[in-house]
Amino acid sequence: MTAAAQYSQVLLAPWRQRDRSAPWGRRALYVLMLACIAACLVFMPSEISWRVALGIAVVILYGIWMAVGAHLQEQNHPHAAHHVPGHLRRLRHAALLGWALCALATTLLARAALWPMGEWPLLLLANASIAVCLLWATRVWRICTMAIVMSPLISDWAAHFKPLWTWLASLWQGQPLALLAVSLLVQAWLVTLAFGAGGSRHQVRYARQSVMRQAMRLQMAGQPMPASAWAGPFERLLRPFQHVTSGWLTHLLTRANTGRSSIMARAEVVLHGPLHWLPTLMLLVTILSIALLCFGAAFVWAGPRIAKAIEHGSFGMCIGLASVGLNPAFGLPGALWRSRREQALLRLLPGMPQGAALNRAVAARQLRDFGVAWLLTTAILLAVDTGTQHALLLCLPLGALPLAILSLTRRFATMRAPSQLTAVLPVLGFFLLAVALYAVNWALGVPLPAIAAGVLAVSAALLAWRWQALGKAPSALPVGWLA
């Protein structure tokens, strides 16, 4: 086998090992990428459309490199690195080749997008640095997470390093090519350093990365990661959640009766599992508490100067808030699938509704959880929108409402096993619908209250239609028994 064929096998492993029995998910992703570029070229003003399209192409290349880098890290198994001759060297050479190709390709696209501005040495240095950071982001995920959390302090920290930046700028102006060469050599060394040689530290790190990869795969498939699989601080962080959930179940059992409310409250703990409203609420409170602590530390550190940075970043934070508040509802059908073995026993509980009553009781519990989350998220976004005046924020809950109703009132008896697309497509769909509603408001001038009224009317009609259909559908439990 030639060297080119060997490196092709290593670099293209994510595509060669794909699931060939279900190619439509990847094809849909490719079509979506091309559609974004085509939409920019068609709908945006001609003087900036091609620049934006090239910028999207740069982001796509970064995403491809990150996928390749993550797979190279997965191939860097400690046993193979230690016992297989040439394995580590081939991985490092392949990583260097991929890093160089990514840096060169993104530099060429960025140079074309910024023409006639932008110096190619500076663009090459910037793109090569980003490629190195993306490779290491698949490994040092804790540092990356902390950097994202503490990002409001970046502007304040930059002021303290202004003399250093001034000195580096003067050095770059004097010897740009020499400094570029030294920087690229250091970055190449960092690329090779990202791959371990099979020692004890490498084994511990690889085991931790395996847990994270498994968690991401389960999350993409709409499945939770068991708390026992997490080690160290994560297990200790999740332990109180388990105690509170167990306490809530004990409370329900001590007051159990044959009433429908008591029956469904106990069944909900099993049906929704980790997406039960109580652990979900505790997780959201924990996330918000950590965010408030970080922002409090930022205010203590930077004082009023941080307010401007938070104001500029409020839009992105609201996008994250909407995702945290609305996304769990789209994972509830997957939670039902995971508890289907216990659902046959739940049907034997005294007082458990059957037939159409069971279908509507299961759907009502899911709609209740989503409705509360939707109202709270919308209220927070309304409060934030008074300061940002950005209609897209309010379009997010409007886009999620009809899709959530369709997802939570489906025929559960015919539901199939969830896949990666099962969890991703509804979330992607409500984001795209939100963008479409925003386009109607921005391009056609339709007022946002009119759009909201239309969405609420359509959602009410969908709910009435699906609620009527639930009365004629087969029994919901156990989920998928007719699939």
Image (tube, grey):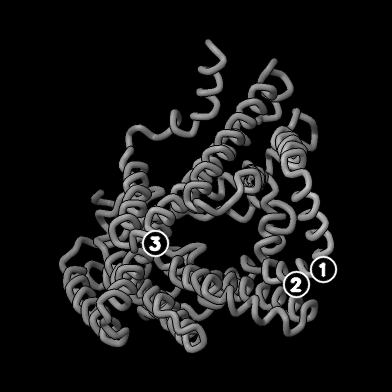
The amino acid at mark 3 is: Val
Q: Residue at x 65, y 80 (%)?
A: 308
Cα separation between marks 2 and 1:
7 Å
Side (left or right) of 305 relative to 431: right
Could you say whether the residue bearing mark 2 is in a helix, strand or loop? helix
* Circles 2 and 1: CB atoms closer than 8 Å: yes
Q: Residue at x 34, y 48 (%)?
A: 34
Q: Is residue 483 visible?
A: yes
Closest to the camera, between mark 1 and mark 3, is: 1
Q: On screen, 295 above or below 174?
A: below
In this view of the protein, which residue sits in the foreground, 73 or 164?
Answer: 164
Label 2, residues with CA under 10 Å away: few <14, some 14-19, many ≥20:
some
Closest to the camera, between mark 3 and mark 2, is: 2
Cα separation between marks 1 and 3:
41 Å
Residue 95, located in which quarter of the rendered image? Answer: top right
The amino acid at mark 2 is: Asp
Label 3, residues with CA under 10 Å away: few <14, some 14-19, many ≥20:
many
Q: Could you tell which of marks 3 and 2 lies nearer the N-terminus?
A: 2
In this view of the protein, which residue sits in the foreground, 388 or 200?
Answer: 388
Q: On screen, 31 above or below 320?
A: above
Cα separation between marks 3 and 2:
35 Å
Q: Residue at x 25, y 54 (%)?
A: 414
Labelled disc at residue 427:
3
Q: Which residue is mark 1?
A: 160
Q: Which residue is mark 2?
A: 156
Q: Residue furthest top?
A: 1
In this view of the protein, which residue sits in the foreground, 453 or 108?
Answer: 108
* Circles 1 and 3: CB atoms closer than 8 Å: no
Q: Residue at x 68, y 71 (%)?
A: 152
